[in-house]
Amino acid sequence: MAAVEMKTCTKCGKTKKAETEFYKRKDGTRVDLCKSCLTMHIDNYNPDTFLWILEEMDIPYIPEEWNVLRDKAFELARQRGKVLDGMSVFGKYLSKMKLKQYMKHHWADSEMLQKENEEKRRLAEEGRAEYEAGLKEQYDKGEITEAQYRTLVSTETQNEELYYAEPMTPETDNPYGDGSQFIDESILDEAAESLTEDDKIYLAMKWGRTYTPSEWIELEKTYTEMMESFDIQDADTIHTLILVCKTNLQMNQLLDSRDIEGFHRIFYRVFLVKFIWIFASIYITNIIWTCVVYIWIFWLICFNVNISIYIVRGLMVFIYYYFWVEFKLI
């Protein structure tokens, strides 16, 4: 068995495996600092913090490639509830530079590669502009529908058309008229002002300090309606109801702000949670099964889970419980 090559970091003084803990230069030699020490001050959005490392390792810098890897790493970190660190992008970028199209290039080729990419981008933009101009001409002549035109042109072009379009007027184009049918914001402010200091303290402790007074009132309204609709006694069920009320408020706010995508993300989860919660409140009396159901509801509310999987699993639990406990068929 071959001996594992070890190397000591000149910064932290720790001895680590050279193969996995030290980056490799273009000539095949290892850098003197371990990965953690070398990347500890990298800001993935500030090239000045990592260009000197690429130069020392003789690796070309291509902003487009770095930015793509950075944005992917940021989205992945966001989904996992983490933040980008120095190694989030750097190691992936080095691997990218080992591909056939880049492996023959060095740090000195950075400017040339950047100019080549700029030229490719310019030609692509010119080709796209010519293509979209043809689509616009077809649309103006009535040869293609508006839906077809909107589908084929880029988002940037559509945004520009909206930006330079004639402004809407309340009398003609605004589907909401002059706004007189909406409730006056001052009425909401007056409702919030009617809360006493004790009310505000109570609502803040119950719902959280990040909500506005008008949101406290909406949460309390939903909570009261649910309490009056069902026989709720134990603390666990009350806590679950509070989570349901908060999620319901968020769903309404997304719909009111016309964030349809965000609304759809939580709509089915909220609908499913309410159904399970009502079912459990009416039909499930066994304490163990009740705890299982409420834990599942908490998971559905607090985490961005794959709803389809948990629907299937949840239905299996209910079917098993229903036939085993109620009819003794399983």
Image (cartoon, helix red, strand yellow):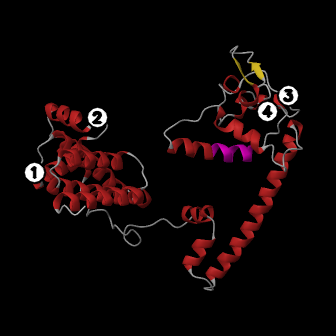
Give the CA distance from mark 4 to mark 3: 14 Å
Give 141 or 197, whichever is nearer the viewer: 197
Instruction: Report the amino acid beneath label 4.
Output: Leu
Classify residue 100 as left or right of residue 91. right
Residue kind at label 2, given as amino acid type: Arg
Name the residue beneath numbered marker 4: 54
Query: Which residues are the magenta region?
Result: 63-71
* Residue 69 drawn in magenta: yes
Tell me the kind of residue under disc 3.
Thr
Query: Is residue 21 shown to the viewer in this render?
Result: yes
**Crowd tier of the residue under label 3, counting other residues whose Cα lies within 10 Å: few below 14, some 14–19, many 20 or above:** few
Please tell me whether mark 2 or mark 1 is closer to you in this view: 1
Residue 22 lies, in percent from the top left, at: 74, 27
In three-dimensional space, the C-alpha distance between marks 4 and 1, rounded to whole angstroms, equals: 66 Å
Lower position in the chain sequence, tag 4 or tag 3: 3
The residue singled out by tag 2 in the image is 209
Residue visible at 15% across and 38% down in the picture: 195
Figure check: 36 above or below 275: above
Whether pointer 2 and pointer 3 mark residues with C-beta atoms closer than 8 Å, the reply is no
Q: Position of residue 83 (x, y in %)?
A: 54, 35
Dominant secondary structure of the residues highlighted in magenta in the image: helix
Looking at the image, is mark 3 or mark 1 earlier in the sequence?
3
Tell me the residue that label 1 is attached to. 231
The residue tagged 3 is 29
Q: Which is more N-terminal, label 1 or label 2? A: 2
